[in-house]
Image: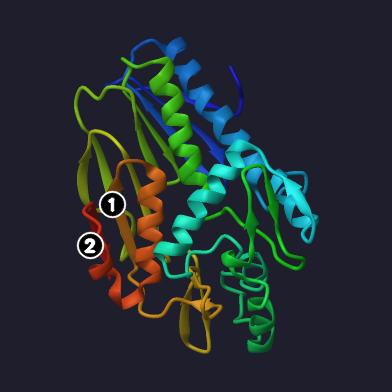
Amino acid sequence: MSEELSLAATSWGHLASFNAMASRCEVLIRTADREQAYIMAYQVLQETRRIEQKYSRFNNSSLLSRLNATAGDWQNIDVETSALLVFSKQCFDLSDGMFDITAGPILKLWTFGPDANVPPSASIQRALKYVGFDKLIIEASRLHLPRGMSLDFGGIAKEYACDRAASLLTLDYPHIPALVNLGGDIACASIVDKPWQVGIEDPSELDNATRTISLTGGGLATSGHTRRYLLDGGKRYGHILNLNTGYPVERAPLSVTVIAANCLLAGMLSTIAMLKGANAQDFMASQDVYFHICR
């Protein structure tokens, strides 16, 4: 048994846990068979780690880091990366350019925590010149990323990994209900005999649920800035950046939770709702999905 993965028996089956993508991850599996539960959970861990190693901007040997390091040249891309770029264009278009994976230059300026400060305005304005998904040239098997620009899949990679892991479990174990939870990004796997009960965290009382919802399929994602923010000059800045301005979104909700057909779609909608700021409610009301907004 891997030391990276812990597995505990429960009244309803088994709960597995591991760390990946800077998050505590869990797999809930409704089977009393410990060996079967371990095999399923380990498959989730492997797929999550594979995607993390491939698309992390903090891993200098990742595919993403190599793409960023050779910006200015045409670069070959595989089918998986091409599909993520196509989805990223949907995020960019639906958000009017605010949800943008070319955020790298801006993200490098902002840090969040007790000792963080707002970056100089001049630095932000310089970085914005190298942001803009519409500057990319994307073909079926190659990409041109202009010199000085960099990609960041941080807004979609965990949700994508969650869906991928759940899809693998559904394919290999269609009759064993499971729930994949990667740091709050959730996807259902296989046939669900009874709903999973999922708590939505109360932003005013962290680690406590403001409500519990039933999940029988699809995915759930929450975007918010209750845990990552900075205080500067008495003003609170959330970590979700408006890439039209280079600054954190103004008047954003504390959190937005969405249930959709899959976790990737739920994550896209919850993030765009945060980016809409004061108009989050109106945006979500037009999307025909379940959502919950905390302010």
Image coordinates for residue 28, horizontal then vertical, percent:
37, 28
Q: Residue at x 30, y 52 (%)?
A: 258
Image quarter for residue 105?
bottom right
Query: Which residue occupies the foreground of this view, 25 or 78?
Result: 78
User: Which kind of residue does numbered mark 1 sit on?
Assistant: Ile
Query: Which residue occupies the foreground of this view, 253 or 157?
Result: 157
User: Which kind of residue does numbered mark 2 sit on?
Assistant: Ser
Residue 116 shows up from this direction:
yes
Identify whether 235 is placed above or below 292.
below
Q: Residue at x 66, y 73 (%)?
A: 109
Q: Element under label 2?
A: loop
Residue depth check, mark 2 versus mark 1: number of the one nearer the observer: 2
The image's colouring method is rainbow
The residue beneath circle 1 is 200
Quadrant showing the C terminus: bottom left
Q: Residue at x 41, y 19 (%)?
A: 171
Q: Within 10 Å of the Cα at label 1, are there few (<14), some (14-19), or many (20+) other Cα atoms?
A: many
Relative placement, left or right, of 280 versus 122 is left
Q: Which mark is residue 59?
A: none
Image coordinates for residue 131, horizontal then vertical, percent:
62, 71
Image coordinates for residue 160, horizontal then vertical, percent:
48, 42
Relative placement, left or right, of 195 versus 104 is left
The residue beneath circle 2 is 286
Query: Which residue occupies the foreground of this view, 59 or 91?
Result: 91
